[in-house]
Amino acid sequence: MKNRMIALPLTVITIILCFPVTLAFTDILKNLTINSRIELGFFIGFAVYLIIHIVLYKPVFMHVMAHELTHIFWAFLFGGKAKKLEVSASGGRVLINRTNFVITLAPYFFPLYTFIFLAVYIIAKEQYLPYIAFLIGASLSFHIALTLYSMKTAQSDFHEDSNIFFSLSFVYLMNVLVIAMIFSLLSEKVNYMDFLKDVPGKFIYMYNKTKHFFTAFAG
């Protein structure tokens, strides 16, 4: 996305979208309660990994592996393929024959291990679902914590196919959308389509509040 005529308006739109999507997601969090073993398993898994990450150990190698494999996976979705893969605890590198901003930023919003566990969750027998939900929660916590950890150092991905403002807002936006989708799969109280339908209403609400503020300020 090197074309500035496209990059600037897309950046502005993405930043603006972050606000109503966040408000809609906040409503999900407010209504989210633990009423089933599946939900309990998810939140225990999320908390367990977070404790491990903070107190004991950061599995950086697993994160780097997921990061590079996610580049490969999304390149494949866009018709590309990988020619070389290097992974170590200090970093990784993958050589692919196709790239765009989605492929470049995918590791920051697509929790690879979580989606693997979600695939197992969908086909698993009911008695195993709470245990798989535990793994989903732990892997999502792993994704969030290690993504934030890796972002403490300069990430060339944020500049490679777009500008830093677009990259950060796009990654944030996609993470919220992905996490909301995961909640909808694990909890009967969360409907993903209702969440998406709520976004335009939140945008209108924000627009009216902003308009009222500037009208009052000008007056």
Image: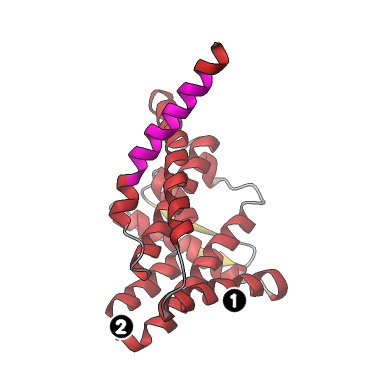
Residue 197 vs residue 114: left or right? left
Q: Residue at x 66, y 50 (%)?
A: 153
Sequence-wise, the earlier of marks 2 and 1 is 1
Q: Residue at x 60, y 55 (%)?
A: 148
Compare residues 41 and 123 and report the one nearer the observer. Answer: 41
Marks 2 & 1, CB-CB < 8 Å contact? no
Q: Which residues are magenta?
A: 198-214
Q: Does residue 62 appear anywhere in the picture?
A: yes
Residue 55 is situated, as x and y percent measured from the top left of the image, at 72, 73
User: Residue shown at 46%/45% (left/top)?
Assistant: 23
Q: Position of residue 126 (x, y in %)?
A: 31, 85
| Structural crowding at the residue carrying mark 2, measured as other residues with C-alpha within 10 Å and reported as few (<14), some (14–19) or many (≥20) | few
Picture coordinates of residue 186, whole percent (x, y): 37, 70
Name the amino acid type tagged 2: Ala
In which quadrant of the rendered image does the C terminus lie? Answer: top right
Which labelled disc corresponds to residue 124?
A: 2
In the rendered image, the quadrant that contains the N terminus is top left
Q: Give the number of the disc on residue 48.
A: 1
SS for callout 2: loop
Q: Residue furthest right?
A: 55
Q: Is residue 161 visible?
A: no
Question: Is 79 left or right of 156, judged from the image as shown?
Answer: left
